[in-house]
Image (cartoon, rainbow, N blue to C red):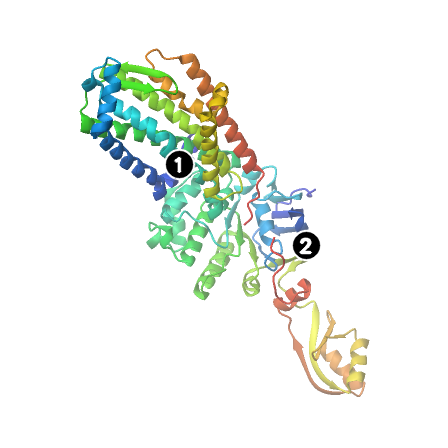
Amino acid sequence: MISDADPEVILEAANLSKSFGGKPALRELSFSVRRGEIFGLLGHNGAGKSTALGIFLGMVAPDGGEARIGGESVQRKRARALRQAGAIFEAPAFYDYLSGWENLKVLMSYSGGFDADEALRVVEEVDLSDRIHSRVSAYSHGMRQRLALAQALLPEPRLLLLDEPTDGLDPEGIKWFRDFILQLREERGMTVLFNSHLLSEVEQMCDRIAIVRRGRKVYDGELAGIADDQVILEIEAGPAEQASACYRKLGGQELEGSSRVNFPEGTDPAEVARALVKAGIDLRKMTPVRRSLEDVYLEVTGDPGGEEDEL
Amino acid sequence: MKLFLIQLRSELTKLFARRRTYIGYGAFLILELVILWVFHLDKPREEMGKILSDAGLEVEHYYSALTVTYWMLGFSMAMLGAIYLALVSGDIVAKESEDGNLRMVLARPISRLRVLTIKYVAVLVYTLTFVWFVGVSGYLMSALALGWDGGLFVWNYDLKVFAFFPELTAGMGRLFLAMLLLSLSMCTLSSIGFAFSCLRIKPAAATILALSVLFVDSVLQMLPFMAPYREHLLTFRMSNWIYVLENKVPWAKLAESYTFLIGLDLTLFVFGWMAFKVRDFKT
């Protein structure tokens, strides 16, 4: 089902399928995350991202396929696989009636034991030392997320699974969180799966992304250069019919409702300008347009916003 | 084993850190005070005195802390105790599932069987401590009100138990043995609540279902034409702790009943585990 374990691959999803009540949530989802990579799993709400995360953590049993962490099958050797991972959820549910410190003690007892010195170090690292002995019910959302980071980091994982971790945080909190994750990767070579629908966050953090739509992967690739596989030029030229013919000759395709023309990868804008002038077309303006991740996202999901059916 | 004990301590920390865990303790202290007050009223004293003198027993000696404690346990545990034990056991998995705490636990390298075992043992510990709290606090309060001396008088019409222990130490020994068996009986109710708690239902639903099972069983036991079948009923088996207070203890009958109850407890645990094992916990 899964190819021989590649030591550079930390997380691997192979043909994951899952249905809830006969409704498909995931359809043969496959991708892999390499060591030290920050990988973004993108999709609308209900696209299947959380189901995938549930399968990686052994909380959801797939109907088909397999998930592996560090070469260990989550479905067959769950404990060995999860020993290598830490997870943070969108709304981490702590025991509100206990202090942050007691929460760490309780949660770490399920991960093999609590080391007070190590816990102190991690608590300091996530900047929660002042309030760690306060009840969690008195914590702000940002403090809860810091505590969530602490509990995820305490078992010293090599993979972090983040499910919409910045949702509900204020801009300062988001920046702190982003910088912290990037620092973790920088200093410890941490591998991160970042599950989000916040494109700006993904754009600033991830090396590679996969986009999921209705449980199916519709894009998987490097984030750098994601927008450079096509050349888009905003052109004002006339007469329009002659200009269109010229674009088509160069492999260009006019984008409906705009003055933008999409040319094949590698097209030199100067060459386009020369061709237009040579054809006697009055070229008034030509500006290269850089596609954003949002453009790509909307293009591959084929849906300008909105949620998919909640699964 | 050491890790299991650490995990159990964590579970007990969570259980005893919640205020609702102590509602039962508080309610029972109040109930014990009420029962003590009732035993101080003239009419109950007269009735009790009549029963004792009809049996040829010295009223002053048997109207004691031990006897009042026996009545407290018998009266209160079957009804009020059942409610609080069902509340805690019905909550133990379902509440964490509802609140999302279980996601945080299940994201760790621990098997579901182990998570459930820890929770089940914690529920049993709670049940045992709860019954013992009621028994010991009831005895201490009764002793403060009536004095430390006196024998133990036991009377149960339904189970046809009539016994008395003139010596304080003998009576106390039997009463503590009865508390031990009563706590084992109550573990069955907690097991029912626990099994329902493992299903995908609200905590309140698990509690109500557990109490419903108990009450339906009690009603069946009360129906006259069910008398030949009462040995198959849960509440009858659960009430068998009283037999240990007979002057000549029917050990075989007790062994049979407690084998039945422990077997049922284990079956309920397996039922809960099987339901829990196949559940998806979506983030």
Q: Is residue A132 visible?
A: yes
Q: Is residue B270 left or right of residue B9?
A: right
Residue wearing tag 2: A216
Q: Which amino acid does label 1 sit on?
A: Ile
What numbered label is drawn on residue B83?
Answer: 1
Q: In this view, does B179 lie to the left or right of A2?
A: left
Residue A260: x and y in percent read 70, 77
Depth check, front residue: B54 or A47: B54
SS type, badge 1: helix
SS type, badge 2: strand
- Residue A233 lies, with reference to residue A146, above or below; the image says below
Q: Can residue B150 be seen in this view?
A: no
Q: Residues within 10 Å of mark 1 (few under 14, many from 20)?
A: some
Rendered image quadrant of residue A170: bottom left
Depth check, front residue: B38 or B87: B38
Q: Which amino acid does label 2 sit on?
A: Arg
Rendered image quadrant of residue A243: bottom right
Q: Residue at x 34, y 32 (%)?
A: B130
Q: How crowded is mark 2: few (under 14 residues within 10 Å), some or many (20 or more)?
A: many
Q: Is residue B166 left or right of residue A165?
A: left
- Residue B233 lies, with reference to residue A117, above or below; the image says above
Q: Which chain carries label 2?
A: A
